[in-house]
Image (tube, rainbow, N blue to C red):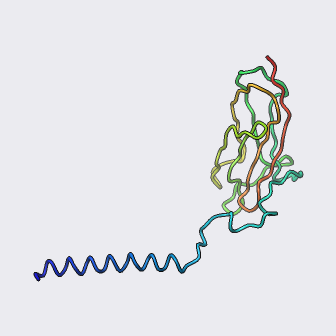
């Protein structure tokens, strides 16, 4: 066996050993990065609909709109004041729904993103506009506003 073949064989054995080691470690080590689903209790994950001055979304939108006509919906977080945008306490996202259908979602960056978003939408039928916001330390908070669509 030549020295280049020997070097290639040693390298192949090392790579194979590393791969097998990764498989063994993966099977023996619990996944701590699995996500929020495994970290929080059902009570913690439940959407909050009660009023909280710092977390309840505030929806600014017209009460009545024309079918198919574009209009703005502004959602800000904190009906009683501004929510902080700090690395340790921030809003992950703001989502807008009509009844149970999600229209749009905006993900926010801590520090650089103020928790206020304006969506430009059009509706075919009225219902309940729902805003959902999720802070990084708790379950999401929700607010709703009835909207009527006229022909």
- Vertical relation: 139 (above or below) 142: below
Q: Residue furthest left?
A: 2
Q: In the image, 25: left or right of 107?
A: left
Q: How many marks?
A: 0
- Vertical relation: 6 (above or below) 86: below
Front residue of 27/116: it is 27
Report x, y in % for residue 116: 72, 43
Q: In the image, 104: left or right of 23?
A: right
Report x, y in % for residue 7: 19, 80
Residue 18 location, quadrant: bottom left
Residue 85 location, quadrant: bottom right
Q: Quadrant of the N terminus?
A: bottom left
Report x, y in % for residue 59: 81, 39
Q: Quadrant of the C terminus?
A: top right
- The residue that appears at 78% across and 26% down in the rendered structure is 125
Front residue of 137/96: it is 96
Q: In the image, 68: left or right of 129?
A: left
- Vertical relation: 129 (above or below) 4: above
Q: Residue furthest top?
A: 151
Residue 29 location, quadrant: bottom right
Q: Residue furthest right?
A: 51
Report x, y in % for residue 10: 24, 81
């Amino acid at each position: 066996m030549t020295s280049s073949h020997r070097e290639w064989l040693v390298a192949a054995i090392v790579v194979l050993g590393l791969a097998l080691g990764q498989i063994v470690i993966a099977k023996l080590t619990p996944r701590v990065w699995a996500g929020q689903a495994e970290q929080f209790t059902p009570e913690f994950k439940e959407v909050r609909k009660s009023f909280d001055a710092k977390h309840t979304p505030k929806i600014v939108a017209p009460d009545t709109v024309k079918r198919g006509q574009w209009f703005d919906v502004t959602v800000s977080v904190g009906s009683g004041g501004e929510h902080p945008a700090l690395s340790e306490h921030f809003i992950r996202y703001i989502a807008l729904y009509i009844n149970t259908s999600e229209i749009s979602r905006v993900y926010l960056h801590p520090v650089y993103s103020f928790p206020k978003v304006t969506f430009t939408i059009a509706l075919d039928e009225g219902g309940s506009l729902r805003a959902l916001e999720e802070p990084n330390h708790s379950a999401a908070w929700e607010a709703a506003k009835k909207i009527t669509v006229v022909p």
